[in-house]
Image: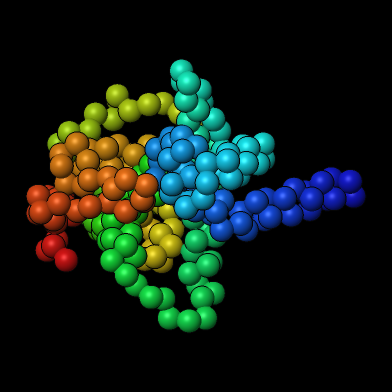
Amino acid sequence: MQDRRMDISANLNRVAALIGDRARVDILTALMAGRALTATELAEAAGVARPTASAHLSALTEARLLSVEKQGRHRYFRIADDDVVRLLEDLMRVAYRISDAPVSVGPSDLALRKARVCYDHLAGEWGVRVHDSFVRRGFLHLGDDDLQLTERGRGFVADAGIALDALPRTRRPLCRACLDWSERRHHLAGVLGVALLDRFIAQGWLRRIQYSRALKVTARGQRGLAAFVEDAAP
């Protein structure tokens, strides 16, 4: 038991050291947008030289915080799994909470707070509004472990163009509440959360921004999302 505690302590120290580096934080944050990126792209995102980025990526991959896939001459990196995604989201929330000075909110920060990718689902103000709308209208029910989509919710989702039977069958729950670090309330994660984000992008309501988690809400999206949540546009 003592040896196991020592192993866990050593691994915690290792993870903390890896995440504590500014360049590695920038790399991980870029990958939180859900896309697989090359070392060259991640070097640009982190503002470091290509060899420096490669060294960071090797360390993160060896620690199993990242996974890598080779296609032709290129190697693509992504967040290893949902556990790492949740860890990073939790750290962002704590970092926001313990900040002593008022947060300087620039255009990029405003965009992140409005709508962003939380690895593969919608977060930020619009993500929370979608979640709250589903709860308010009885589309979601809090079960023993996870959120459950009600029959009424299934009908609404189908009408929105999402075929639940066609969604990938994985160990991930269909619906999961994910605490939003900027809004301090829940947004909708899980397989349905992924499908909703994909649908919003396909409809032209949201657009991805290169090397950023922020999502551009289009004029069409302002109207479409407001109607989707049955609310007035912000």
Residue 139 visible within the image: yes
Which color mode does the image show?
rainbow
Q: How many labels does the image show?
A: 0
Image vertical order of residue 149 relative to residue 96, above or below: above
Q: In the picture provided, is 22 more to the left or to the right than 234?
A: right
Q: Position of residue 13 (x, y in %)?
A: 74, 54
Q: In the picture provided, is 51 more to the left or to the right than 105?
A: right
- Closer to us: 204 or 167: 204
Task: Specify the farthest residue to the right.
Answer: 2
Q: Position of residue 229 (x, y in %)?
A: 18, 54
Q: Which residue is drawn at 27% across and 45% down?
A: 208
- Closer to us: 222 or 169: 222
Q: Quadrant of residue 175?
A: top left
Q: Position of residue 165 (x, y in %)?
A: 30, 25
Q: In the picture provided, is 31 more to the left or to the right than 207?
A: right
Q: Which residue is drawn at 46% across and 34% down?
A: 38
Image vertical order of residue 162 relative to residue 227, above or below: above
Task: Specify the farthest residue to the bottom.
Answer: 101
- Closer to us: 46 or 31: 46
Q: Position of residue 189 (x, y in %)?
A: 39, 46
Residue 82 visible within the image: no
